[in-house]
Amino acid sequence: MAHNGNELYEVRNTEGRGMSAFAIRDIRAGERILTDKCHITNTDHRTFGEDWQDLMDNFFRLSKQAQDQVLELYAYEPPERINQVRNALPPNSLTPETLESYCHIFFTFQSNCFEVQPSIHNLDGSIHRDHKSGLFLKASRFNHSCDPNLTYNTTSIPGYYVLTAARGIKAGEELSITYIPLYGMRKERQYALRGWGFECTCPRCEGQDSEYDERLQEAILEHRRATGNESAKLPPSRRPQEGEEASIDMINRRIVLLEELQWLPELYFAYMDSGRFHLEEFGQLEEKDIDGATNALRTGLGLLFRAAEAAQQVWSDQNILVVEVQQEIEGVRGVLDSI
């Protein structure tokens, strides 16, 4: 069991899930959990061989202690992917023992890396700036959920991973992030998670209310008792039918309750969740229904504006959350202008 200097969470081994992080005290929405420095980067080059060599060069520049810490992390190494790596390298370029060792380094990085620099393309389609990924030792200890209670940023402060509580968290609660874009349909999320070798069973995927939703409902009932408004109906908590997905219903229900409570930090994250849901919807509709895609984009932009308004009432203009939502707004505006 490992405590961290800020005394917000501990990392311990859990049956069936490996090393996991748990809150050791109540944490407020918007509270910073971790700032972690990047240990290894890998640039996407034109060929797999260049990518491979870049990663190995950067790994072996680390101290022996840092190398050992990296290799303690989880690595998903399915045999078919090992064969793909072997076939992509020049024949007989590595001994079997070296290849096995290097594959473990490669798959450890692939299982734990985050985007640290998005690619930028020129108008003619050529690459202006390469895509770059990075590995962060402490950040790699947080498990996945499709309804995460943490949000992270790896691009606003170059070389650092900033982790923030996306809602109120109780002591003893597991801390989670998302490894993937939070697509609307469960089957799409499960497909995207194949690269980590597990199936997600979080409340969102199982169509259940989370502990957070239950706490939110209790807070609303207490608020209404205090204000003499007990007769007002709660928005329904819809259970999905077979093959359906209740994600946006869950998010919008949270927004309705949080607006009534006026919990601005948590409302900021709920607006962001809903906005990003619609931005993902835009990406899925863009090639087959441009009108539907444009409507999804405009809905997402409106929610980002509401998130920005909530953020500006809570945090300073220099806060990373305020900066992040402003950057997303500018990005969506640019897409809208190009349609």
Image: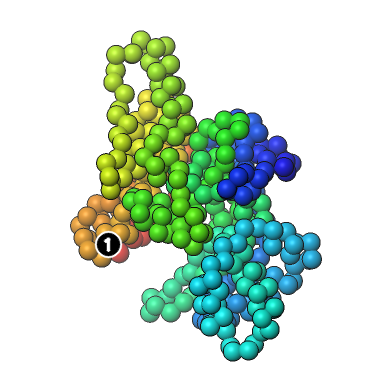
* Foreground of the two, 323 or 58: 58
Q: Kindly identify the amino acid type of the residue bearing the numbered disc 1.
A: Glu
- Look at the image and tell me whether residue 88 can be seen: yes
Q: Quadrant of residue 206?
A: top left
Residue 34 at x, y = what percent?
64, 46
Query: Does dot 1 land on a helix, a strand or a loop?
Result: loop
Whether residue 312 is situated above or below residue 188 in the rendered picture: above
Count every numbered label the image shows and give the total: 1
**Residue labelled with disc 1:** 286
Q: Determine whether 91 is above or below 107 in the image.
A: below
Query: Residue at left 74%, top 65%?
Result: 67
Residue 271 visible somewhere in the drawing: no
Residue shown at the point (40%, 59%) measured from the top left: 191
Q: Is residue 199 left or right of residue 292?
A: right
Q: Position of residue 210 (x, y in %)?
A: 44, 34
| Quadrant hosting residue 253 | top left
- The answer to whether residue 280 is above or below residue 100 is above
Image check: 133 left or right of 285? right
Q: Is residue 308 left or right of residue 94?
A: left
Q: Which quadrant would the N terminus be assigned to in this image?
A: top right
- Asked which quadrant contains residue 316, the reply is top right
Query: Taking 142 as reference, is 74 above or below it?
Result: below
Name which residue lies at 62% across and 73% down: 103
Farthest-out residue, right: 64
At 46% from the left edge and 49% from the top edge, which residue is drawn? Answer: 200
Q: Residue 117: x percent and y percent?
A: 54, 64
